[in-house]
Amino acid sequence: MKKRVAVLRGDGIGKEVTDAATAVLESIGRRFHHEFEWVYGLLGGEAIDQAGQPLPDETIKICEASDAILLGAVGGPAWDNNPSHLRPERGLLQIRKHFELSVNLRPVQAFKSLLAVSPLKEEVAEGVDMMIVRELTGGLYFGEPSFHDEEKAVDSLVYTREEIERVVIHAFELAKLRRNKVASVDKANVLESSKLWRKVVEEVALKYPEVEYEHMLVDAAAMKLITYPAAFDVIVTENMFGDILSDEASVITGSLGMLPSASLRSDGFGMYEPVHGSAPDIAGQNKANPLGAILSAAMMLRSSLGMIEEAKAVEEAVETVLENGYCTTEFINIGRNVLSTTEMTEKIVAEIEAKVTDK
Ligand code: NAD
Ligand code: IPM
Ligand code: MN
């Protein structure tokens, strides 16, 4: 099979981890006889510097002509004081909106071999396997009016029934394929948007009698997420709560660098990126954990390219390399072999290539 993938490496460690992901996909191509065509595009800070805007038209064209988008991360101190329309993060929000990537899937899985390096007690982290379903194109990130002057600042939290419905339906459908449980997280004791959110969840739930669901206030959910994380199956929530809770949940796995994500349009077209940012504190040092990006590539194989066996091969390789005692520098290190970004990537590639056959 031949597939064309738009590759937006972005800034900082975004470049390093995306290169790791494409190297792993190349090895998948060799093992399963596929050809990947990488088409590189600018996004974020580098795009501001080279093309004068965080999401150039050329990048949109490249993505429109591709089967899926692979993204690193954007942002960095060089652009932190830019006006809002010239911030790298604006480009990320624009591309999500342009491609209507309204459902963001962020799986959180505690790998058995990393339990000892999780900041949580082993017995708390053990067995964690949840899917955070984050609404991605509405809420505070996109509401109007949005401005600030010297005396006043305004952000608007707006949700329509349609925006809530599509992400909630996605969450219930996913729950059916998993453990039939949904926790809908909101702030309905205060926010009007959460009141509508709750109502829509209850209406959707009527169509899924086999799925057990509960409403949870976001403050309590943040607490429960690290005290009893194994209780969660699917979490569905609005844009900003999902952003914050997913970084929190990453801690269970041992590192933010472990978490992948898929941002999906209703027809299945998707953009795949690790949950972490451009990590300016470690950028350019070959230290970044590439596994979140590599696991995002696996999600791309499965969800957008129809390559199920290939996705499993990537995930199995990650699991095996972790079981063999390797990790990257950011883990609380308890007697594991610490690798650089490129060394970790080479280990994963070697694991995939070890199973190359002449079929
Ligand atoms: P960050 O996620 O970049 O980093 C937070 C901490 O986690 C840092 O200490 C970093 O070193 C560590 N970390 C992150 N990813 C890692 C990895 N793969 N391996 C090892 N350690 C890792 O968040 P931040 O520092 O708050 O933000 C930095 C920049 O990234 C900001 O400009 C922010 O807007 C941007 N950002 C972008 C995205 C994205 O593009 N999707 C996501 C989050 C933040
Ligand atoms: C993420 C990031 C982005 C978000 C920022 C960089 C706009 O934190 O993808 O989680 O808040 O969605
Ligand atoms: Mn985030």
Image (cartoon, helix red, strand yellow):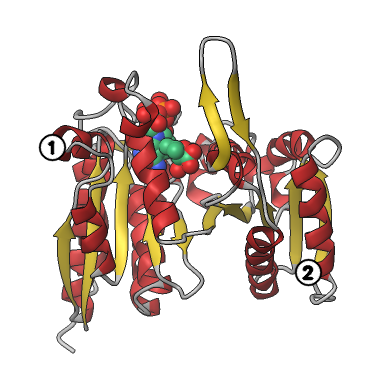
Residue 121's spot in the image, x, y percent?
A: 64, 35
Residue 8's spot in the image, x, y percent?
A: 24, 51
- 12 over 105 or under it: above or below: above
Q: Is residue 101 left or right of residue 18?
A: right
Three-letter amino acid code at the position of disc 2: Val
Say which mark, if any, is on residue 204.
2
| View extreme (top): residue | 150
Q: Quadrant of the C terminus?
A: bottom left
Residue at (38, 36) in percent of width and height: 89
- 117 over 38 or under it: above or below: above
Q: Is residue 20 left or right of residue 313?
A: left
The picture quadrant where one finds residue 23 is bottom left
In this rendered view, identify the residue nearer to me: 135 or 191.
191
Disc 1, SS: helix
Q: Residues within 10 Å of mark 1 (few under 14, many from 20)?
A: few
Distance of label 2 from label 1 (alpha carbons)? 46 Å
Disc 2, SS: helix
Three-letter amino acid code at the position of disc 1: Gln
Asked if disc 2 and disc 1 are in contact, CB closer than 8 Å, the reply is no
Residue 297's spot in the image, x, y percent?
A: 34, 61
Whether the residue carrying mark 1 lies under 8 Å from ligand 1 is answered with no
Residue at (26, 58) in percent of width and height: 60
| Camera-side mark, 2 or 1 | 1
Q: Residue at label 1?
A: 50
Q: Answer whether residue 277 is visible to the viewer in this image.
A: no
The picture quadrant where one finds residue 247 is top right
Q: Answer whether residue 118 is visible to the viewer in this image.
A: yes
